[in-house]
Amino acid sequence: MDEGVGHILKALADRGLAEKTLVIFSSDNGGERFSRNAPFFHHKATLWEGGIRVPCMLRWPGQLPIGKTSEQAVITMDLTISILAATQMTPPEGRRLDGTDVLPILQGEEPLQERTLFWRIKEQGIVQKAVRKGRWKYVLDGIEQLEMLFDLESDPGERHTLFYDHPDRVHELSQSLAAWEHDVDRRISPHRK
């Protein structure tokens, strides 16, 4: 894979396109069951950090700093918005896209932003929902909807639930998750038959 990526980057450079090209390398989910996702818990097809936290690398000579690592929380939908911004395109009128243009943050023009990010899985017998706001992550896991709260700064492996220690945070995040689900379901239902 490293060799293949190298061929792509060389082809861009050979054609004089490197500085005009935003290259994005990422994954849509964590590794499979037999992957090692440490220090994160679990794997693909879950909403634990081992299933949703992945590396994302962007390369755009002259536009993004070289070798910089960012702690900005992003989600895949941000890439769509960021690509549109990089190409000076706008979404079709009336089309609401999720995500945020993260390029100004990565370029150092804007400070890191606290984000509220949502996920859910309801398929093949798996029921999971999660919301992350800053350092806090609220998880509903399983059909019985076991509730947990994690501080991802001190516990990125999600090993120690703080559910009973922070009831106000649990209430805030669970209400935020419910409102997000209502909005998503409202937007999706007219398109389903």
Image (spheres, rainbow, N blue to C red):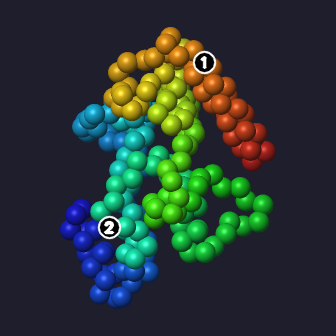
Which x, y percent locates residue 125?
50, 26
Residue 54 in sight from this viewpoint = yes
- At x 36%, y 27%, the residue is 155
Which x, y percent locates residue 50?
36, 36
Q: Amino acid at mark 1?
A: Asp
Q: Does 100 appear above or below 13?
A: above
- At x 24%, y 71%, the residue is 6
Image quarter of residue 59: bottom left
**Residue to which mark 2 is pinned:** 66
- At x 51%, y 37%, the residue is 134
- At x 51%, y 25%, the residue is 139
Residue 33 in sight from this viewpoint = no
Q: Does 21 appear above or below 137?
A: below
**Residue to which mark 1 is pinned:** 168
Quarter the C terminus occupies: top right
Q: Secondary structure at mark 1?
A: helix
Find the residue positioned furthest to the top: 164
Which x, y percent locates residue 3?
20, 68
Q: Secondary structure at mark 2?
A: loop
Estimate how packed mark 2 is, as few (under 14), some (14 to 19) or many (20 or more) residues with alpha carbons within 10 Å: few
Image quarter of residue 116: top right
Find the residue positioned furthest to the bottom: 15
Which x, y percent locates residue 21?
43, 76
**Lateral position of residue 44 relative to residue 137, left or right:** left
Q: Does 114 appear above or below 102?
A: above
**Lateral position of residue 191 relative to residue 42, left or right:** right
Nearest the camera: 162 or 6? 162
